[in-house]
């Protein structure tokens, strides 16, 4: 599996303390909802183990989406495709980070940092492969989603051995310890993008 992931780290500013703007880690206990400009909806909440459970429903007639469980929302433990909200059999992927587990994966909030870790990827048919993933931060910028404004820190998470330039793009909010998938790049050129137009507290319906 050759994969490059771009993660964007966000931090809520004091001037954006609107009633519905998620601003604290406790907001993940009841969940948050993000609506995108293409009509897709993402729900995020924190489970009893402190991991992020994400459910995304894309806005399309096929009813496609996915469910995942991860640390911070980008260091995935497992992911599964969905169809009209139902799990698709044979599409589950499991990620194993080795004896140290996810303790190697930190929540980077500092600009221009970089580190690499190893993990094993196992697919539903039992096939597995090892990969090395590099996490690297860039520099902060400001981002506005609806009534909520955040300070954004882009981060690239890439397959150490990859040469295809493919990147998934995320947005991470340090104040919440959670990230949001917002697109795919290829050699820094967007080939898919869905920008958030609303982020609010609570789990709103996905349909």
Image: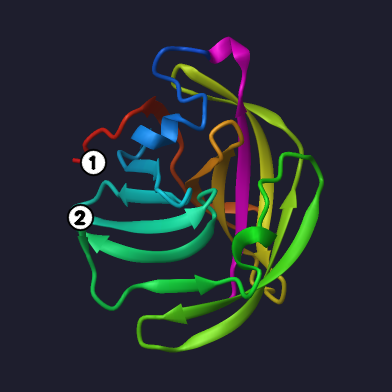
Which SS class for mark 1? loop
Dot 1 crowding, Cα within 10 Å, few <14, some 14–19, many 20+: some
Residue 30 placement: quadrant: top left
Q: In front here: 194 or 200?
A: 200
- The residue at 78%/40% (across/down) is 110
Q: Which colouring convention does the figure follow?
A: rainbow
Residue 86 x/y as whole percent: 19, 60
> Is mark 1 in CB contact (under 8 Å) with mark 2?
yes
Residue 197 x/y as whole percent: 41, 28
Mark 1, residue position: 206
> Quarter of the image containing the N terminus?
bottom right
Mark 2, residue position: 85
Which SS class for mark 2? loop
Residue 132 x/y as whole percent: 68, 73
- The residue at 45%/89% (across/down) is 127
- The earlier-in-sequence mark between 1 and 2 is 2
In the rendered image, residue 58 lying in the magenta stretch gets the answer no
> Quarter of the image containing the C terminus?
top left
Q: In front here: 149 or 125?
A: 125
- The residue at 62%/53% (across/down) is 6
Residue 113 horizontal side relative to residue 132, left or right: right
- Visible residue check, residue 34: no
State the extent of the magenta-drawn residues as a range.
1-16
- Visible residue check, residue 164: yes
Residue 166 horizontal side relative to residue 93, left or right: right
Q: Is residue 24 above or below residue 169?
A: above
């Amino acid at each position: 599996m050759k994969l490059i992931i771009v993660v964007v780290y966000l931090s809520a500013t004091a001037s954006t303390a609107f009633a519905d703007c998620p601003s604290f880690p406790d907001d993940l206990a009841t969940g948050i909802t993000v609506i995108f400009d293409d009509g897709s909806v993402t729900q995020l909440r924190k489970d009893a183990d402190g991991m992020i459970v994400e459910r995304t429903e894309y806005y399309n007639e096929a009813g496609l989406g996915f469910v995942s469980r991860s640390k911070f929302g980008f260091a995935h433990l497992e992911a599964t495709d969905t169809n009209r909200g139902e799990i698709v059999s044979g599409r589950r992927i499991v990620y194993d980070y080795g004896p140290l587990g996810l303790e190697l994966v930190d929540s980077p909030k500092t600009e221009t940092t970089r580190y690499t870790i190893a993990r094993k990827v196992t697919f539903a048919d039992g096939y597995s492969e090892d990969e090395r993933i590099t996490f690297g931060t860039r520099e902060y910028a400001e981002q506005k989603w609806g009534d909520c404004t955040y300070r954004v820190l882009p981060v690239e998470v890439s397959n150490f051995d990859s040469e295809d330039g493919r990147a998934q793009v995320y947005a991470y909010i340090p104040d919440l310890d959670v990230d949001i998938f917002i697109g795919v790049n290829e050699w820094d050129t967007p080939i898919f993008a869905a920008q958030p137009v609303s982020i609010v507290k609570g789990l709103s319906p996905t349909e």
